[in-house]
Amino acid sequence: MAFKLRYETGIAATIQFIVITALNFLNGASDTVKQCTTPNSTTSCFGNILTNSIFFMMITVVFGVLWLIGFAAQDRRSKRIAKLLIAGELLLCLVGLFDLKYNKGAVIGEIVSVVEIISSLWVAWLAFRLMLAKGGRVKPIRIHKHHKTQS
């Protein structure tokens, strides 16, 4: 039986946090190695390491905040917290789209952007379903088939 998340925004945000943090670490490490090993590079290796470290920490903090909001929305089943999570995830989706459009050439960077977009839409969808439940149970979406009546 497959594990299906219906309203578990905390679990989804945890998966998002782990995957995006790992991918951003790989992206930063790859970028640093590439720039530090390039001959005649105009940037300093130490400056690049420092910049990438600060950028990585900022990204980790942002995803950590989204992670906490995801767990708060799941635990409290609050419509307001779910809306805040949706807004944060949609902002993240826009950042991912921006990165995908303007960071051409770096394969890892493009993978990070695609994963950001997909995971942010997924978590936002779970938060939207949680918001629609208005503090109650999130029920599976079912399509009712209409049967013809015979006369």
Image: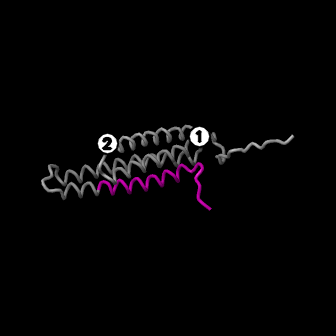
Q: CA distance from mark 1 to mark 2?
A: 33 Å
Q: Residue drawn 40% across and 53% down?
A: 20
Other residues around mark 2 within 10 Å, as few (<14) / some (14–19) / many (≥20): few
The residue that label 2 is drawn on is 102
Question: Which element type, helix, strand or loop, lies under badge 1?
Answer: helix
What's the residue type where badge 1 is placed?
Met
- Quadrant of the rendered image containing residue 129: top right
Front residue (pair 80, 48)? 48
In which quadrant will I find the C terminus? top right
Magenta stretch, main secondary structure, is helix
User: How far from the left and from the top, in percent, is residue 102?
Assistant: 31, 42
Front residue (pair 26, 151)? 151
Tell me if 55 is positioned left or right of 145 in this view.
left
Other residues around mark 1 within 10 Å, as few (<14) / some (14–19) / many (≥20): many
Does residue 95 belong to the magenta stretch?
Answer: no
- Residue at far left of view: 40
The residue that label 1 is drawn on is 131
Q: Which mark identifies residue 85?
A: none
